[in-house]
Amino acid sequence: MEQAQKNPKTFYIRTYGCQMNELDTEIMVGTLENRGLTRTLVENEADLLIYNTCSIRDLAERKVMGKIGQLGRKKEKKALIGVTGCMANAKKDSLFRKLPHIDFVLGTNNIHDLDYVLDEVIATGKQAFKTDDQFTFELDYTKAKRDDKVKAYVSIIRGCDKYCTYCVVPYTRGPEVSRDCLDIVNECKILADQGYREVTLLGQNVNSYGKDKPDMGCLFHDLLYRIDKIEGIDRIRFMTSHPVDITRELMEAVRDLDSLCEFVHFPIQAGSSRILRKMHRIYTYEQYMEKIAMFRKIVPNVALGTDIIVGFPTETEEEFQMTYDALKEIEYSVAFLFAYSARKGTPAMRWKDDVPEEVKQERLHRLMELQEGIYAKQRQQMLGETAEVLVEAATTKDPNLVKGRTRCWKNVVFPGSKDDIGKLVDVKLHSYNNQTLFATPINN
């Protein structure tokens, strides 16, 4: 027979996956602290454990299942355990069968229900779950508890309508729902008043912003122009993008807006049009390259990022070579490279995963070697240049060194103090190690 649970006094929360999950965690931390709980960074000291999960890749999901499974093998269960995030939406109440010791499951579209679900579990002792398929309740993002005092994530659109055949996101986060333009601008104004210098606009596909709400009269580039006018916000970033929705108006905004950083994540995924069609990416390789050429003509110094999947079902060696050649030609500043893994619930799961694992890994290794060479070339070319760096923190090893990023997303370390945190500092780049650039501040 179930019994009422004790009210937790401390909580521990662990985040897996993307920046959207990080922001959802910040909202949950704010909710729990408003409830009177104290956050601890030591797992076994907490009365409440929350695991904010990711389902985008099989490895991420297995790590979470293994971690939470270990808690069930302990002789005595001391804490309430909750699973939130994409895995919660993907598996719903079936998680209780696999992990019978957990107390609640909360989906990505139900972050606002955290208080309610906790009350239910505490009062009844019964397991509870809420996993809506669509985002309908607008969150109060001003209650998010952010650890970073310089940079902030700002949600502008949730869900995805693209239905790439390898991706679970449309099924775990639901269809696209744009947030009200005025709410976003007001949040950015509040962040500026609180001393934040940089905002990163988040969405599974930020470029679709506003298309689901034509009466609002605000598309993505319109939103960027409004945020650019906010005094105190020195930098705007955004992620992630779908190439189909990257418009000339967006490119011109990157060129014209002082606060908008010249770094755009522009994921190609594959260099073969046949594979892109099988992935349901809705563009051909040729169309993608036309947009790259247009972007570089409008913004010659734009830095581009990408995601690439190798070993997608039926990918031939010749088609992999097309991806290799695309990576070599475009020379991305940031590249996230992955071997394909089938995800339950996606259309691609119907197809035979026919590229052997050793072939996937060999192709992935070749791409990684190529990209490392591109990184080294780019860093070498930057030496002797000046760059603007937003100082984010002192380094952990030496308080007399500070670190931050350039507008184009490069890590830089240089001499400074904690008084520099939150400032824009011009530096001269003189050397590098791995992916970190080293610099000397320029005294203005």
Image (cartoon, rainbow, N blue to C red):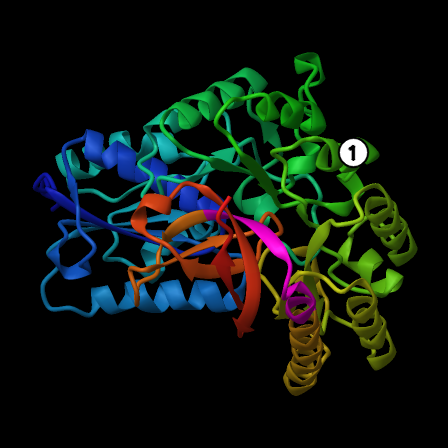
Q: Which residue is nearer to you in this view: 188 or 317?
A: 188
Q: Residue furthest front?
A: 444
**Is 148 included in the stretch rendered in magenta?**
no
Relative to 41, say whether 5 is above or below: above
Seen at 69% across and 58% down, the residue is: 306
**Is 385 included in the stretch rendered in magenta?**
yes
Left/right placement of residue 224 relative to residue 286 reads: left
Left/right placement of residue 315 relative to residue 384 reads: right
Any part of residue 355 in sight:
yes
Q: Which residue is nearer to you in this view: 337 or 166?
A: 337
Left/right placement of residue 13 relative to residue 78 reads: right
Helix, strand or loop at disc 1? helix
Q: Where is residue 273 shown, x and y percent of the image?
A: 88, 61
Residue type beneath disc 1:
Glu
Indicate the quadrant where residue 376 lies: bottom right
Give the magenta range.
378-390
What residue sits right under mark 1 in the picture?
252
Relative to 371, say whether 142 is above or below: above
